[in-house]
Image (cartoon, grey):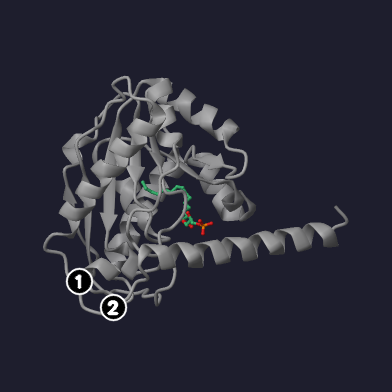
Amino acid sequence: MARREPVYEVVQVLARSILGAQGLRVQWRGLENIPTEGGVLLAVNHTSYVDFLEAGLAARRAGRWPRYMLKAELKKIRVMAFLIKHCGAIGVDREHGAESYHEAVAALEAGEAVIVYPEATISRSFELKEFKSGAARMSIEADVPIVPLIVWGTQRIWSKGTQRRIGRHRFPVVVEAGPAIRPDGDDPVALTARLRAAMGETLLAAQRGFPAPAGEDWVPARLGGGAPPPEEALRLEQEEFALRKAKREAKRHANGG
Ligand SMILES: CCCCCCCCCCCCCCCC(=O)OC[C@@H](O)COP(=O)(O)O
């Protein structure tokens, strides 16, 4: 961010301390692909509730104070609202995204780094889901590059459909940035496809040599693990979202709206 934000500085130290307390063995790779200045989108795969820590710290290692795009519902939690405000995060209303879209484009045009999750939600298969086109549209509109950023291994700590493993477990994690993609006159559909392909390649690179014990709940089905394959993962996600929607509506009725 443009101005110095003491809260964000403290949050960064806390983020590092959390990784240190877990004893995570993080390998940072390809971070030279993150430009040290100028507007840039960092497109991150979403496999866990905690991958935002590594994504943000990767940006910090490139000297950036990244502005996260995250679901606006988080603002309902007091401490999150505080963090979001002081860390310049941009709340996304997943049903009406226009406002956050414009806020992010303005940030990119002002030369800031913006973290975006093109899958919009955690992938329970740990494979790349279908992508939303927002990242590509923002890149085109602000004329800034997109850096594919893969965080691999944090799904073993805390994700969906997995056992939660909190504590000093010393798990390995790979954080790998791929070469930046420029919009180059592509339309949003073509650029989204290029971004997804680039993130897929970086994901495979991050997985090379990474442990994949057979049957484990955090290992993708493709690698012999126990995670649901993409179609099954999508079905579980749709179930969860339908249930949430029903709950929201029941609440609205109860409140007389
Ligand atoms: C320098 C790095 C330090 C980190 C700075 C953090 C500043 C921003 C604070 C807010 C972070 C909140 C992260 C919440 C992560 C999370 O909860 O992800 C899961 C959701 O997406 C998926 O939710 P859903 O799709 O609705 O199931």
Within 10 Å of disc 1 (Cα), the crowding (few <14, some 14-19, many 20+) is some
Identify the image quadrant of residue 77: bottom right
On the rendered structure, is 130 left or right of 38?
right
Amino acid found under the numbered disc labelled 1: Ala
On the rendered structure, is 236 left or right of 53?
right
Using the image as rendered, state which of residue 39 and residue 161 is in the foreground: 161
The image shows residue 42, relative to residue 38, as above or below, that is below
Amino acid found under the numbered disc labelled 2: Glu
**Which residue, given by chain and number where applicable, does mark 1 sit on?**
212
On the rendered structure, is 155 left or right of 6?
left
The residue lying at 20 percent from left, 71 percent from top is 212
**Which residue, given by chain and number where applicable, does mark 2 sit on?**
216
Q: Where does the N terminus fall, quadrant-wise?
A: top left
The image shows residue 139, relative to residue 23, as above or below, that is above
Residue 2 appearing in the image: no
Q: Are marks 2 and 1 in contact (CB under 8 Å)?
A: yes
Identity of the residue furthest to the front in this view:
231
The image shows residue 73, relative to residue 34, as above or below, that is below
The picture places residue 18, in percent across and down from the top left corner, at 34, 61
Identity of the residue furthest to the bottom in this view:
215
